[in-house]
Amino acid sequence: MKEPAIVSEIVLIAAVSENNVIGVDGNIPWHKDRKKNQELIKDDFDHFKKLTVGYPIVMGRVTYESIPPKFRPLPGRQNVVLTGDVSFREKDVYISRSLEEALHHLGDRRFQIQGIDYSKVFIGGGQQVYEAAMPYATSLEITKVQQQVEGRELRYFPKIDPAQWQEQKREDKQGYSFVTYARK
Ligand SMILES: NC(=O)c1ccc[n+]([C@@H]2O[C@H](COP(=O)([O-])OP(=O)(O)OC[C@H]3O[C@@H](n4cnc5c(N)ncnc54)[C@H](OP(=O)(O)O)[C@@H]3O)[C@@H](O)[C@H]2O)c1
């Protein structure tokens, strides 16, 4: 594992299909059929909220902009957006040009916000950001969705190498499971 940051835990959080897809046409795949996936969407949203509230969360610009404007920045969390676009502005969001800079910023006491716990940083996607963060990750919170996803504009979660990761906790539901992986 690489060691870039002062933050001690770096947690990738994602919902992933059986064929490793996290996004289709700029959206979360199972959000296309909200009625059919109602229970999964609600449960996964609650799970995401329960784990991430109170901590910083880092996202790519595309993922951030895919959140409906009335729900962003994600409340109760320090939102961090990665972008190379120097004109990108968003109120109450820390904007960073690189993952490494963002992690150093979050680990620097001088910039820390009261009410946020900096012992853990969540990485909320998408593909580009998961790929950049995987070498630094200490744990993975994966919602494994028992669906195969097809489409043209697909985004994927990086491979979870069994030589490096072990399943630590698992909660099976109807059609999906919440799985925690710890680095070996
Ligand atoms: N299933 C899930 O749990 C889940 C979670 C999150 C997202 N998603 C899905 O994933 C898809 C989006 O993923 P994506 O890979 O296309 O986009 P993304 O990772 O969300 O955002 C990509 C953008 O972020 C910026 N960026 C990424 N890495 C950077 C880095 N290391 N340093 C600086 N800037 C960086 C760049 O912004 P600029 O172009 O502005 O420079 C880049 O174009 C969507 O379909 C979304 O719904 C799924």
Image (tube, rainbow, N blue to C red):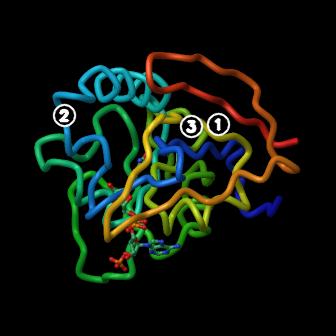
- Say left or right for 8 vs 39: right
From the Cβ of disc 3, is ligand 1 less than 8 Å away?
A: no
Q: According to the image, label 1 marks what residue?
A: 119
User: Real-space Cα distance between discs 3 and 2?
Assistant: 20 Å
Q: Is mark 2 within 8 Å of ligand 1?
A: no
Q: Is residue 145 above or below residue 88?
A: above
At numbered mark 3, what does the secondary structure look like: helix, strand or loop? strand
Asked whether the viewer can see residue 94, the reply is no
- Packing grade of label 1 (10 A; few <14, some 14-19, many >=20) is some
Residue 90: % across, % down: 22, 61
Instruction: Determine which quarter of the picture holds residue 1.
Output: bottom right
Viewer-proximal residue, 138 or 19?
A: 19
Q: Which residue is mark 2?
A: 34
- Residue 28 percent location from the top left of the image: 31, 49
The label number, if any, that marks residue 142 in the structure image = 3
Rounded to the nearest angstrom, the CA distance separating label 1 from label 3 is 20 Å
Taking 184 as reference, is 60 above or below it?
below
Query: x, y percentage for residue 109?
Result: 59, 48
How many numbered marks have been drawn onto this rendered protein structure?
A: 3
Res. 95 in view: yes
Q: In the rendered structure, which amino acid carries the disc numbered 2? A: Arg
In terms of image quadrants, where is residue 81? bottom left
Residue at x 23% of width, y 60% of height: 65
Residue type pointed to by label 1: Ser
Task: From the image, state whether disc 3 or disc 2 is nearer to you.
Answer: 2
